[in-house]
Amino acid sequence: MIARRLYTSRMATEVCVHIDAVDEVKQPQQRVCEECVKIGAQWVHLRTCQQCGTTRCCDSSPNRHASKHARASGHPVIASAEPGERWLYCYPDDAFAEY
């Protein structure tokens, strides 16, 4: 199990079952947004899906591919793919956890 501190927009005592289910954090295979590369677009930051391992751009990026992927696929949890950042985010629960 991964040691983590959890922050949610709800009560601090609530546990995010999606983040809790992540046993091993998937890291990016490459530091590129797979979808932006296909269309020749740029991104701001990268996020890696913790269910399928694909890496896509953040919501500060023009195309917001990570959140689009989460909505379309139902994959709830991403990890920052930025060097030095160690956190997870759950879209449906609006929960954030450092690891």
Image (tube, rainbow, N blue to C red):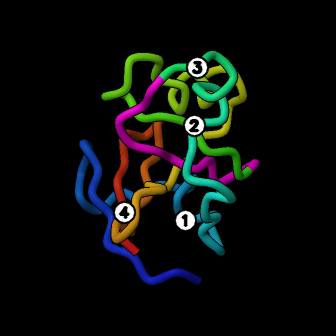
Measured from the top left, where is residue 10 in percent x and y? 26, 44
Q: Which mark is residue 40?
A: 3
Mark 1 or 4, which is nearer the eye?
Answer: 4
Which comes before the other along the chain, label 3 or label 4?
3
- Name the residue beneath numbered marker 2: 33
| Disc nearer the start of the sequence (3/1) | 1
- Do callouts 3 and 4 mark residues in contact (Cβ within 8 Å)? no
C-alpha gap between disc 2 and disc 1: 26 Å
Residue at the outermost front position: 40
CA–CA distance in space, label 3 to label 1? 35 Å
| Residue 99 drawn above or below residue 17 | below
- Give the quadrant of residue 93: top left
Which residue corresponds to mark 1?
Answer: 20
CA separation, marks 1 and 4?
10 Å
Report how far apart the C-alphas of labels 3 and 4 lie in the structure. 32 Å
Q: Earlier in the sequence, mark 1 or mark 4?
A: 1
- What predominant SS class does the magenta segment belong to? loop
Q: Which residues are magenta?
A: 42-52
Q: Are marks 1 and 4 in contact (CB under 8 Å)?
A: no
Q: Nearer the viewer, mark 3 or mark 4?
A: 3
Q: Closest to the observer: 77 or 81?
A: 81
Give amino acid for label 2: Cys
Residue 69 lies in what quarter of the image? Answer: top right
